Image (cartoon, rainbow, N blue to C red):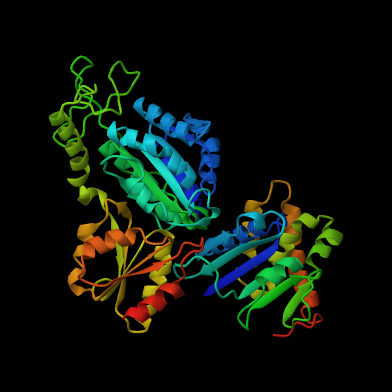
Amino acid sequence: MRHEIRLSGSGGQGIILAGIVLAEAALHEDKNAVQSQSYGPEARGGASKSEIIISSEAIDYPKVTAPDIVLALTTESYKKYAKNLPANTVVIVDFSVNVNGDTGVLSLPIIQAARDELKRPIVSNIVALGALNAVAKVVSPESLEAAVLRRVPKGTEDLNRKALALGYQLVGKYMLTSGYIR
Amino acid sequence: MSPTIKLLQGNEACVEGALAAGIQFYGGYPITPSTEIAELLAEKMPRVGSAFIQMEDEIAAMAAVIGASLTGAKSMTATSGPGFSLKQENLGYAIYTEIPCVIVNVMRGGPSTGLPTSPSQSDVMQARWGTHGDHPVIALCPSSVEETFWLTIRAFNLAEKYRTAVILLLDEVVGHMRERIEIPDHVDNVLTRKKPSVGREGYRPYQPDADLIPPMASFGEGYRYHVTGLTHDETGFPTNDTEKAGILIDRLHKKIDNNLDDIVEIETQMMEDAEIMVVAYGSTARSASRAVKDARALGIKAGLFRPITIWPFPANELKQYLPQLKQVIVAEMNLGQLILEVERNVAGKAPVHGVLRGDGELITPTQILARIKEVQ
């Protein structure tokens, strides 16, 4: 198995951490994983990107070239990082992203749900991870949860568990009604 | 995931390697893309009772490393291109005065302040010839996070064993990417420098043993001696005597050249029957590895030759493949540096082609494969 995953959003949304968590979850399952990120001006504010390759084989070239999963939490990052994708790429965006009529995009109220249901928009990245894994089944839910809990600050475990669960629920709720057809 | 398996950046693995090798002093001045090394060592070194100093600049940092090493402390600094330039004068001093130390250079785009957050391999010749004078150099170049851990330990070992400065050349890709690494609980074969077997009265600081390496007394242990960047004799004091100058410079080179088997390390992939040899190092070797596998899938007999020790250049190792080679390709993130050394050693026995890139992007497997197809 091999996944090439690109997570994007704006600086401060926890995109890098989400990538690290996903890569660590894969290591937990004895797979290989490489995570890299964009540095420089674009990593502060603007569009931020974290890329992960997960494979049961050794990973040589460490950069993502043909992502099979792309997440975009902002319109800017969608425009920048969700272009020229292979036809079968799973694209998940936040509700707030203007996809400009593109089809085949799964639009989920990730940020809104984190804000309204958990009162903590800061966990949007973890909600997004739950949603991503619900759709693409990159790692087992148990591995993902364990990886999240290893990385989040002490005392926020419950909040982050709920955030993950919320991500899974959003997919269950919106997959059929969002016009997302694959 | 057992506790020893981690997802780390190359820079973080370098820190773990330095700690495993027993680093006792770090003097540095943070610079992208090496900053994580200083950041993490600043956190970890005080906890194990060793010293971290952020100096006022890179020149002073290199000087501090040399001074600390003279007291017996295993010492390291880390930097990137602009800082590496500043360290050159003191690097030469460390080599000539035979003071063990490790200099990490996480290569970024240049010249000048260049592209701070982008990778390059454009300091390869600077590592070899950046400091003036006819000096030998050891430089190592890892391709992965795990290899960075082991080569950091090896850099310390070679520095201590041969009493010289050892350069660890990372590039931004290897420094910043995170991947799986298994960190052992304990590392065997950690070397420390040879100490004098004579008392302070009979100690001649630059009198070599049969292995051409002089035992090194630590400042503060009662041995008093003179250290100078001027040409010196066995007492450590300056001399203009041409015979003594010749003895010193010859010995400095021979202590490295006589031990190439110990110092030079390479990796090859599918070279047994290869007709096209791709030479690549650091992160570029990862792309080359992919390209070579893809070429094999197309029935092209390609192989990878990866210098892990980049200086001294693995000339003998490369030359053994010459009879079977029809084409040689060198892939590096610069406009042609190690390719010169490859050409010199291939010596016209096969055409040498470059896949060269200096725009701050990692060379892709596709680029290398295209070149393989073109020249086959």
Q: Please give left or right for residue B255 compared with residue B221 in the image.
A: left
Residue at image x 72%, y 65%?
A128
Name the residue rendered at 75%, 57% in the picture.
A123
Q: Is residue A121 visible?
A: yes
Say if B161 sits above or below B127 in the image.
above
| Residue B15 in the figure: left or right of residue A77 | left
Q: Position of residue A19 (x, y in %)?
A: 62, 61
Residue in the foreground of this view, choosing between A83 and A162: A83
Q: Nearer the viewer, residue B211 or B248?
A: B248
Q: How many marks?
A: 0
Q: Is residue B155 left or right of residue B177?
A: left
> Can I make out residue B80 in this image?
no
Give residue A55's position: percent from left, percent from top: 50, 70
**Is B303 above or below relative to B209?**
below
Q: The C terminus of chain B appears in which quarter of the rendering?
A: bottom left
Toward which corner of the image does residue A149 lie, by quadrant? bottom right
Compare residues B220 and B204 and report the one nearer the observer: B204
Drawn side of residue B34 relative to residue A114, left or right: left
Give the farthest residue toward the right. A116
Which residue is at 18% across, 37% downward? B251
Q: Is residue B294 above or below residue B203?
A: below
Q: Quadrant of residue A158?
A: bottom right
Q: Quadrant of residue A139?
A: bottom right
Residue B309 on image: x %, y %? 31, 53
Query: Which residue is rendered at x = 75% and y = 60% of the image?
Result: A124
User: In the displayed structure, would residue B80 be above or below residue B52?
Assistant: below
